[in-house]
Amino acid sequence: MYTTRWKGKIVVSSKEIEMHFAEIMHLAEQIEMLAGTLKSAAEDELMQVICKNRACWNSICADILIGKEVKIGAGLLHEANKLYEIGKQMKQQAKRMYQAELMNNQLAATRVYSQQS
């Protein structure tokens, strides 16, 4: 990690800022992919299991089980949506932080330059 100290302040290099930004964006993408996988499992795979169970087993207990499976599927969908939103928010915040850090570096460089003249 390349940092410099100037009057007690830590200045992070532009390269390091870009590396952190890319890392956060990659993590956000992974979270969004996980959300998609979870959503697919809840919508498609779980529903197939429910339909197979229903076709093979007709009773009050089967109805209770299907009700619980549907409730679990709805919970998984809810969590998938929350994960997707977290990934989206991470991207937005990372972009804002990236722009702010680059601006801070530019301001710091200008300040240092003007004091040397």
Image (cartoon, helix red, strand yellow):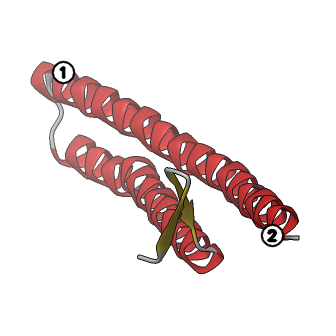
Residue 55: horizontal and vertical position, in percent?
Answer: 26, 47
Q: Residue at x 40, y 31 (%)?
A: 74
Query: Could you classify mark 2 by the number of other residues whose Cα lies within 10 Å: few (under 14), some (14-19), or many (20 or more)?
Result: few
Residue 43 versus residue 60 in the image, above or below: below
Q: Image check: 19 left or right of 1?
A: right
> x, y (%) of residue 92?
68, 49
Q: Nearer the viewer, residue 37 or 55?
A: 37
Report if the CB atoms under discs 2 and 1 are less than 8 Å apart: no
Q: Determine whether, in the image, residue 64 is placed left or right of residue 110.
A: left
Going by the numbered disc 1, the residue's amino acid type is Ile
Label 2, secondary structure: give it. Answer: helix
Residue type, label 2? Gln
Residue underneath mark 1: 64
**Badge nearest the viewer, 2 or 1:** 2
Residue 38 sits above or below residue 13 on the image = above
Judging depth in this view, the residue of 79 and 89 nearest the camera is 89
Residue lying at 18% horizontally and 21% vertically, measured from the top left: 64
- Which sits in the foreground, 61 or 96? 96
Q: Indicate the secondary structure of the residue bearing disc 1.
A: helix
Q: Position of residue 68 (x, y in %)?
A: 23, 26
Q: Which mark is residue 18?
A: none
For the N terminus, the image quarter is bottom left
Question: Which residue is tagged 2?
Answer: 116
Give percent across and percent down for residue 73: 35, 37
**Real-space Cα distance between discs 2 and 1?**
77 Å
Where 83 sits versus 65, above or below? Answer: below
Name the image quarter holding the C terminus: bottom right
Between 96 and 25, the residue placed more toward the observer is 96
Give neighbour class at mark 1: few <14, some 14-19, many 20+ (Cα, 10 Å): few
Q: What's the residue at 87%, 63% (across, down)?
A: 114
9 on left or right of 111:
left
Q: Earlier in the sequence, mark 2 or mark 1?
A: 1
